[in-house]
Image (cartoon, rainbow, N blue to C red):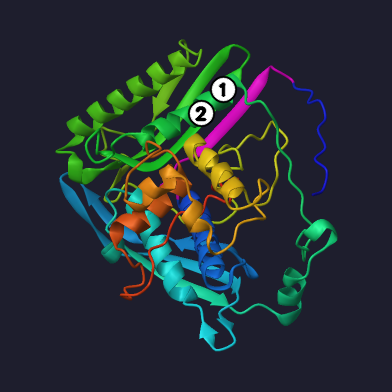
């Protein structure tokens, strides 16, 4: 393993800017679906061949649809289109790997788990553009370098910071708390396309929250404004718990209630009509966008919750190596109790773990995600520490 270099971080405390894009933001959707495809390919390769084969599927584009939102309902008039592109090994000898099915089923499972008002069958069209990689890259990936470390076909680096500041912890807690509630019963009008931005200038803190409200759960403008007020109160209360009781909170700042121009959607995401998405424009590995801090510009990773990280370490140790290299296709027999619960569809992480959500939804949906009667159900792969990536507006 290459050495990790740690150096003191000099900071200027006068100004701080922190942002987080929620699970329903088009950029976060692209990040998560690309990550989901990679995890599912890793599981399929591991199951079939006992090792992970070469793949590079970190490209995704979301082209927003068309919608006519309305209080009490509304409709999606043109579907959201999602393109998953990249390279992956699709055949080994005479054995074909159903990459397209893996991509589509995994994406549908993630969308169903994370967007409660989105009808995946009617509102989304998923298209795959994944092809076999070049022979030289496949050969490079199969070779090992010093100490058995896989070789890379590109230069790469990672930059981060620790610990998080109080403001960074607050921004992450706000979006995680909103996404982690029982979204179908607790304020179902609050959609998952949430963006939280915090600006601290000296001791003054301003929080701006954008939340796609779902018209089907609102009778009219009065209900809409009431939901905005309740959301602002929830954010203010959360800020107080994190040491910012005197902050200002603004929700859906672009609204003009008198003219009827408000942030209203059918599905709870602006992807239905107002915005497009792309991999690499969302949250960094720590789940935040922090322009005043050192951070990598490439893709981040989904971030399993603490119980899942504990499970990962236990399963690695049980499979023959604390560093994870002991994992093989028979490791499922050694999984600890939490992953056995996941196979039964039992939630263990309060819904705040994107890796768990993706895997649990696939298990809950059907026993066999491709529809074949003899195929095994996908299980969450917690061998990647991934939080949707990105950085942009």
Image x and y of residue 240, in percent: 44, 13
Mark 2: few, some, or many residues within 10 Å (few <14, many ≥20)? many
Would you identify the image quadrant in which residue 158 lies? top right
Q: Which residue is mark 1?
A: 167
Front-most of residues 69 and 356 = 356
Would you identify the image quadrant in which residue 154 lies? bottom right
Query: Is 197 within the magenta?
Result: no
State the SS at label 1.
helix
How far is the residue under mark 2 from the one under mark 1?
6 Å
Image x and y of residue 3, in percent: 83, 43
Q: Which residue is mark 2?
A: 171
Q: Residue at x 27, y 58 (%)?
A: 119
Q: State left or right for residue 345 relative to residue 321.
A: left
Q: Which mark is residue 45?
A: none
| Above or below: residue 303 compared with residue 142 | above
State the SS at label 2.
helix
Query: Is 22 within the magenta?
Result: yes
Would you identify the image quadrant in which residue 144 lies? bottom right
Query: Looking at this rendering, what residue extends furthest in the right direction?
Result: 146
Image x and y of residue 54, in percent: 65, 70
Q: Quadrant of the C terminus?
A: top right
Q: Residue at x 48, y 50 (%)?
A: 335
Front-most of residues 225 and 34 = 34
- Whether tag 2 and tag 1 are in contact, CB under 8 A, the answer is yes
Q: Is residue 393 visible?
A: no
Q: Residue at x 26, y 32 (%)?
A: 258
Q: State left or right for residue 90 relative to residue 64.
A: right
| Above or below: residue 293 compared with residue 184 | above
Q: Which residues are magenta?
A: 12-25
């Amino acid at each position: 393993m290459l050495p990790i270099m740690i150096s003191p971080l000099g900071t200027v405390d006068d100004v701080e800017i922190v942002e987080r894009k929620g699970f329903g933001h088009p950029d976060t959707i692209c990040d998560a679906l690309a990550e989901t495809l990679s995890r599912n390919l890793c599981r399929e390769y591991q199951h079939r061949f006992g090792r992970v084969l070469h793949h590079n599927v970190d490209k995704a584009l979301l082209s927003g649809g068309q919608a006519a939102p309305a209080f009490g309902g509304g409709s999606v008039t043109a579907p959201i289109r999602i393109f998953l592109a990249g390279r992956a090994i699709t055949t080994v000898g005479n054995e074909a790997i159903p990459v397209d099915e893996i991509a589509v089923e995994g994406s549908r499972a993630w969308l169903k788990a994370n967007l409660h008002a989105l009808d995946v069958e009617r509102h989304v069209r998923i298209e795959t553009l994944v092809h076999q990689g070049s022979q030289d890259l496949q050969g490079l990936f199969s070779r090992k370098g010093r100490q058995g470390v896989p070789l890379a076909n590109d230069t790469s680096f990672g930059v981060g910071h620790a610990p998080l500041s109080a403001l960074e912890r607050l921004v992450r807690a706000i979006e995680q708390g909103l996404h982690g509630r029982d979204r179908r019963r607790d304020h179902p009008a609050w959609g998952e396309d949430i963006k939280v931005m915090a600006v601290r200038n000296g001791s003054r803190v301003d929080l701006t929250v954008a939340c796609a409200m779902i018209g089907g759960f609102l009778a009219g403008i009065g209900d809409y404004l009431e939901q905005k007020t309740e959301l602002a109160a929830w954010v203010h209360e959360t800020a107080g718990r994190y040491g910012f009781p005197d902050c200002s909170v603004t929700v859906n700042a672009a609204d003009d209630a008198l003219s009827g121009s408000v942030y209203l959607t059918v599905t709870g995401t602006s992807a239905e009509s107002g915005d497009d998405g792309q991999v690499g424009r969302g949250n960094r590995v720590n789940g935040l966008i922090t322009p005043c801090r050192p951070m990598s510009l490439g893709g981040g990773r989904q971030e399993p919750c603490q119980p899942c990280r504990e499970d990962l370490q236990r399963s690695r140790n049980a499979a023959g190596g604390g560093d994870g290299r002991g994992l093989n296709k028979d490791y499922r027999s050694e999984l600890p109790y939490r992953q056995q619960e996941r196979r039964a569809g039992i939630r263990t992480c309060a819904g705040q773990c994107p890796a768990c959500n993706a895997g649990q939804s696939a298990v809950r949906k059907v026993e066999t995600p491709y529809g074949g009667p003899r195929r095994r159900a996908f299980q969450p792969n917690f061998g990647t520490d991934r939080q949707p990536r990105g950085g942009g507006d």
